[in-house]
Image: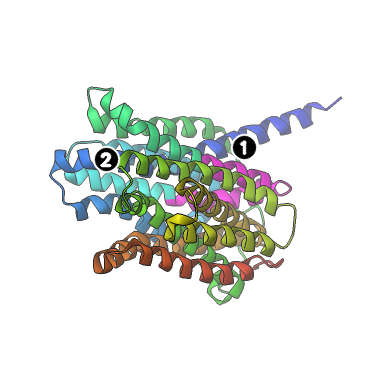
Amino acid sequence: MPSATSVSSRAKDGLLATGILLIAFNLRPAIAAIGPVAGTIRETLDLSNSALGLLTTLPLLAFGSVSLLTPVITRRFGIPGMLAGAMGLLALGVAIRSIPWVAALFAGTVLLGIAIAFGNVLLPSLVKQSFSKKFGLMTSLYSGMMGVGAALAAGITVPLAEGNPWGWQGALAVWSLPALLALVVWLPQLSRSRQLLTADGPRKKGKYLGRSRLAWNVALFMGLQSFAFYVVLAWLPDMLQGRGANAVFSGWMLSLSQATGVLGSLITPLWAGKRSDQRSIIMVLVALETIALLGLIFPALGPVQLWVSLIGSSLGGAFGLALYLIVVRSADTETATRLSGMVQAIGYLLAATGPLVAGSLFDLTGDWRLVLLLLLVVAGIKLYSGLGAARAEVVSV
């Protein structure tokens, strides 16, 4: 019969895991909700397409710039305190963004981008610290929850906008509610803030992560995955419409890519957790992505649904694996926080350039196949950096 202490410990771990999953769920809806109502926002506020594009780019720039600062700020407030603040700031940013005023729209977007950046960096560190024997399972669950949040927001934002008297403002404001729920569920963890502040001991002075080849390989793998993901997210419907598909079908294909991405992000970390060296997984993921890109370049090779499913699952799997590599390639929690900051800063700054580079290439050439060829080149570089990141080594500081 389990002791009272054992039962209490399991209950605390269960509450912690629930809090992590709720926070993870909130790290994508605020961004994914914009696309479906972008046209309505443009008409209501009389925005240009360039200004509208900033609503997607600004959070990515915030991710990249804030990620490097997060480890420093965390040493002052602790991981639980920072995550509580992130959920509060996210709810505030979403609420401000929902005000029908251009300045509020962009100010709220910047705030929610900063909040999400904190969550992006700190969740791998917390998993490293609190679930040392279940890296793969927890990474699988929380990366999957991020995908679920994005897919749900993309799917129901338009019905929400059409079904309430506040239109798109109300549909965007709704996404502050899950953030507030996550904050409430997370509050009990604040009592552990001192315990989880620097549980690995006092800060150690060691080598600068920028000098670690392993750290750079993990960062580039994450960055190139994000580059490809956001190109597909931004331009897949246009690519398909350019070859004759209608807008409804193209939209469903984007949804299919996101759904299969959730499956990929759920399965891959579990797979990775069963081995110390993940190079074979890298090769499988890049091979699937390459096959999918070739299928999209040459439509006669097979149905587009197959290629869209493959590229979604391979990119989702690469995302889940990148998060797992941050955890497993770190010697301790402090290193995981610093590596996560470096990896996500580089990753999301690269991601922010993806849609712009792809769109500019199409504007110059008028041929989406050249964009897909660019993604093939990116996949090749990702294979090289991924093989370096997947070796059974650790970064220490």
Task: Locate residue 224, reporting x and y percent.
Answer: 48, 64
Mark 2 lies on a secondary structure that is: helix
As shown in the figure, which amino acid type bears the numbered disc 2? Arg
Give the CA distance from mark 2 to mark 1. Answer: 30 Å
Q: Quadrant of the C terminus?
A: bottom right
Which of the two discs, 2 and 1, labels the residue nearer the N terminus?
A: 1
Residue 127 lies in the magenta-colored region: yes
The kind of secondary structure the magenta stretch mainly shows is helix
Q: Quadrant of residue 88?
A: top left
Q: Does 233 appear above or below 218?
A: above
Residue 334 visible, this angle: no
The structure residue drawn at horizontal position 37% and vertical position 62%, both measured from the top left corner, is 354
Task: Locate residue 134, reporting x and y percent.
Answer: 71, 46
Which circle marks residue 259 in the picture?
none
Q: Nearer the viewer, residue 164 or 78?
A: 164
- Residues packed near mark 2 inside 10 Å, few (<14), some (14 to 19) or many (20 plus): many
List the residue tagged with mark 1.
17
Which circle marks residue 97 in the picture?
2
Q: Nearer the viewer, residue 301 or 16?
A: 301
The structure residue drawn at horizontal position 45% and vertical position 62%, both measured from the top left corner, is 345
- Residues packed near mark 1 inside 10 Å, few (<14), some (14 to 19) or many (20 plus): some
As shown in the figure, which amino acid type bears the numbered disc 1? Ala
Q: Nearer the viewer, residue 203 or 227?
A: 227
Q: Which stretch appears magenta?
A: 117-146
Q: Is residue 115 left or right of residue 74?
A: left
Q: Nearer the viewer, residue 10 or 99?
A: 99
Mark 1 lies on a secondary structure that is: helix
Residue 271 visible, this angle: yes
